[in-house]
Image: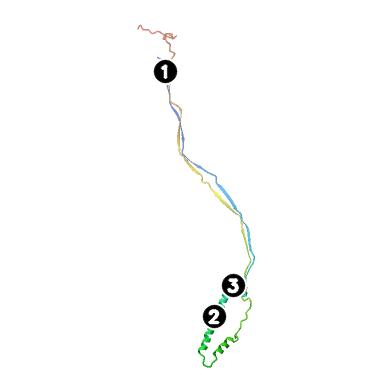
Amino acid sequence: MNQLIKITTVPIQYELKINNARFERQSSEAQLEISRNKGGLSIKSRPVKLHLDSSAARSSVSPTPTQSVSQAAQKGTEAAYSATAQLAQEGQLLLKADIGQDVIGQIMQQRTAAPTGEFQLGFTPSAPVDINYEAPDLTINYEMDKLNFDLKIANGNFEFIPGNIEMSITQHPDVLIEYVGGPIYVPPSADPNYEPIDVRA
């Protein structure tokens, strides 16, 4: 009896793709910035200065009201001291006077006596003019142009990519059943090659 069915088993097929781990560096561009500071020439000149202070000279000729009051008060104080001394001296004479002595005449003679002594010659104004002199000044300043360089170096970024395994199935498993026999006739007697079965034995 011939084999009528052929069974074929189809195995699974797959592919493995292995990606190794890697370390990647992403670099960026360096940048250079240049800036300029402009210089220049500057000249500063100060002319001669002459300071004249004539306040003291003017005060000696025509004093201010405040100075007049102060000078009058000083003179009044000196006159009071002088009058006090003169009265004390005249009182001493009156205390020591003898009978018949003309003390009053002596006192009047002293009061009306002409002044004696050295007289000081003065000039007007009595105070000099204060003169102050400042020499001229010339300052020259020259500054060159300046260039500023700012360099920014790129360090870059580092990235770690882990490894992986990719599996792809190219053929799924299967079972193939194939009929390899001849045709089947119903009834069997329709088969042209039909041979009757001998049942006599």
In front of the other: 90 or 131 = 90
Q: Where is residue 194 drawn, in percent x and y?
A: 42, 9
Q: Which residue is mark 1?
A: 5
| Rendered residue at 53%/86% (across/down) | 90
Q: Depth check: 36 or 119 in front?
A: 119
Mark 2 vs mark 1, foreground winner is 2
Q: Secondary structure at mark 1?
A: strand
| Mark nearer the N terminus (2 vs 1) | 1
* Pointer 2 residue: 80
How many circles with numbers are drawn on the protein? 3
Amino acid type at image mark 2: Ala
Quarter of the N terminus within the rendering: top left
Depth-wise, is mark 1 or mark 3 nearer the camera?
Answer: 3
**Element under label 3?**
helix
Which of 75/144 is in front? 75
Please determine whether, in this image, residue 78 is positioned above or below residue 1. Answer: below
